[in-house]
Amino acid sequence: MLCRCLLVLAAIYTLSAQTFEKTVQPVLTKTCSPCHNERMASGGLNITGFTKASSLTSDRDGWSRILAKLKAGEMPPKGIPRPKELDATIEFVQAEIDKADRNTRPDPGRVTARRLNRAEYTNTIRDLLAVDFRAEKSFPTDDLGNGFDNIGDVLTISPVLMEKYIAAAGTIARRAVGGDPLPKKPLELQLHMKDKKVRRVDPSTIEGTTHIEFDGEYTIRIGLPGERAKDAAPVKLGFWMDGKLLNTITAETKPSGLVYFNPYSDETMRLYIPEGDHVFRAGFIDDAFVKTLDAKALYDSRKNKYLESITFVGPYAAAVEKPSRKKILICDPKTGQACVDRILSTLAHRAYRRPVTPAEVAALSKFVAMAKADGQSVEQGIQLAIQAMLVSPNFLFRIEHDPNPTDASKVHPISEVELASRLSYFLWSSMPDDDLLALAESGRLRGQLDAQVKRMLADPKSAAIADNFAGQWLELRNLDVVKPDPQKFPLWNPDLRDAMKTETKLFFDHILRENRPLAEFLDARYTFLDERLAKFYGIEGVTGPDFRRVELTTPERGGILGQASVLTVSSYPTRTSVVIRGQYILNNILASPAPPPPPDVPRLDEGETGEKASLRQQMERHRADPTCAVCHNKMDPLGFGLENYDGIGKWRSHDGKFPVDATGTLPNGRSFATPAEMREALKSQLPQFARCMVEKMLTYSLGRGVGTTDRRTVDDITRSWAAGDYPFQSLIFEVVRSLPFQSRRGESVTK
């Protein structure tokens, strides 16, 4: 029987080798080898090692890269005849790789213990203690791995970061419990235009950034010099913190008695303001009133009622108990140790994201006893215990356990409690809520997984996917650090930047929540705009500061490649970049990035651009060098397709003195003449875009890079997703159901 099996296997291998020699070898030797050989390995590829059938099993990674190029139409390049055996070659190689993958034992991979990154820390503190703590302002920037900042292998803890954690834990615990007394006398903090502590956003709005020292209620005075006519109507005045409207009041704008000779008034309100750095804004929100403001006579107090200052007086004890105290003090700790232990066990259970042991609760109770022995209150003792929780590895790390940690062959499902954390940090960038954790601890989560994913996606906390996944996939975070040249781009300002970022986040969030098809990222005929961004785009009929869905009626805009955020982060400070934009598309849409440039590439002459030659003409001269052409022939045509947008995404018809030429060709040979035609052409690459998204979503959800052992999973998810025309939520469900998301293996140990 064994001999017969061996004979069958030998026959299959012989047949496979014969097919390889007949079908694949002619393509390699006649079409590929002239450019991809030992002497001239174009694109870093030498096919010498791929000319035997055995290479299909010995170097599946290499063959997978070759196959991707062939299927995308990138090879053979333009000008090289397409061999008649090419389709058969693609079909044969794909079948052989699929067969090898099927015969390989499934490997879900292994995720390193993952430290909470800054976004996860912020959100976890919010959900655990109801405290607004922004880790991005207190902790160093998280390192990136595989394009994301939640990769376990790079999320280390340095001594500096540990010091930051200790300091933050004290601050957060104090704010959460509020056991320390407030200052005996209220403090006063003023932001005034004369001190340049506030800036005028527009004639009706001022904005300033400051640090609030204590949580508490504050009397807020908004200084309003000036007056309108005697019959002027009152106007609505708004007050914002960090972009959120906190309150509106009605402000008088006409003179009254002696105020006519000293036309200054304060409008006051009393609000709860949390400790920390905040951006405050005061502004008129009555459109009819705003339109009557005389910008030319803005500071003439006899003609305008304008905003000049924001003053904070406080803190005062809040009339209503803080949400954090309600969340923490689930019983009165003054009643005795039983209540203290209940508070601590409940908090530790949620902070550690798993059941806690009596020994762990007892260890935390010792901190309460220490505080009481030092003459402090029991609430201050609970603060100290919370501080200890927040520096525990059980809080700072997401730790998963292996039954056989040193046996790399042992694949096992992660526990349901661990699955709950994987799910919550994937969809919410935060800890599991009580419902999710309770399901996991009762062993019922896997049976209700789809229902939980649906519930969690409907929760507002799923906006974290737009903030953290889309923010990194589309490189939106770079908007906070780009600095377009104000001489070249005078329209650029912080408000326009924020509007750009908001548009793309709302657009992504809409596609996710409404389960729209993947293709809408490329060609959606709608977007989300406020008046400022609509004017920048030249779109009429949008008024006011609120973002709303706007239907696009002209071909200039559409999908993410027509949005100013993407166009700005893929440009230089002084001009566009066809290379960066082309590489952006290759990396983020087609998953086929060009290799990095050699170190001795000469820079373009910035003085020539738009004056002596268009950017396109300069790049075409650059591509005349055969060494440069290998990569630039792939990148530049895609970048040219976006040349109608300047360095901050504004539409243009000329590059300086020269008309824009947006013609180009995709790697698969499909040509286009305008940005709209390029977007349509990219839709022909939808399967490639889908695979790109699968790889990026897996990377983000798992917290590790996608490798050879994940190819089978990527193929399965992509195939299943395609069956439904790529509705976006289906990708989330497929990732969560996958083997790597629900399982792990032991670690290989070198002896």
Image (spheres, rainbow, N blue to C red):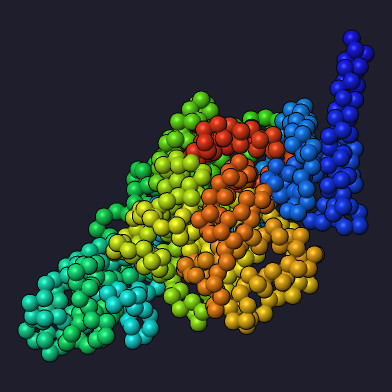
Closest to the observer: 679 or 100?
Answer: 679
Closest to the observer: 120 or 68?
Answer: 68
Total marks shown come to 0
Q: Dividing the picture into quarters, in which one does residue 96 lie? A: top right
- Residue drawn at point x = 50 percent, y = 82 percent: 487
Residue 186 appears anywhere in the view: no
- Residue drawn at point x = 58 percent, y = 55 percent: 672
In the rendered image, residue 338, in percent from the top left (x then y), is placed at: 41, 39
- Residue drawn at point x = 40 percent, y = 52 percent: 526
Quarter of the figure that contains the C terminus: top right
- Residue drawn at point x = 79 percent, y = 37 percent: 85
In the rendered image, residue 509, in percent from the top left (x then y), is placed at: 44, 49
In the rendered image, residue 395, in percent from the top left (x then y), is placed at: 55, 48
In the rendered image, residue 481, in percent from the top left (x then y), is placed at: 54, 69
Task: State left or right for residue 717 relative to residue 272.
Answer: right
Closest to the observer: 702 or 8?
Answer: 8
Determine whether 716 is above or below 77 in the image: above
Residue 614 appears anywhere in the view: yes
Quarter of the figure that contains the N terminus: top right
Task: State left or right for residue 32 relative to residue 523.
Answer: right
Closest to the observer: 617 or 579?
Answer: 617
Hey, which residue is sitting farthest top in the picture? Answer: 1
Task: State left or right for residue 632 relative to residue 415.
Answer: right
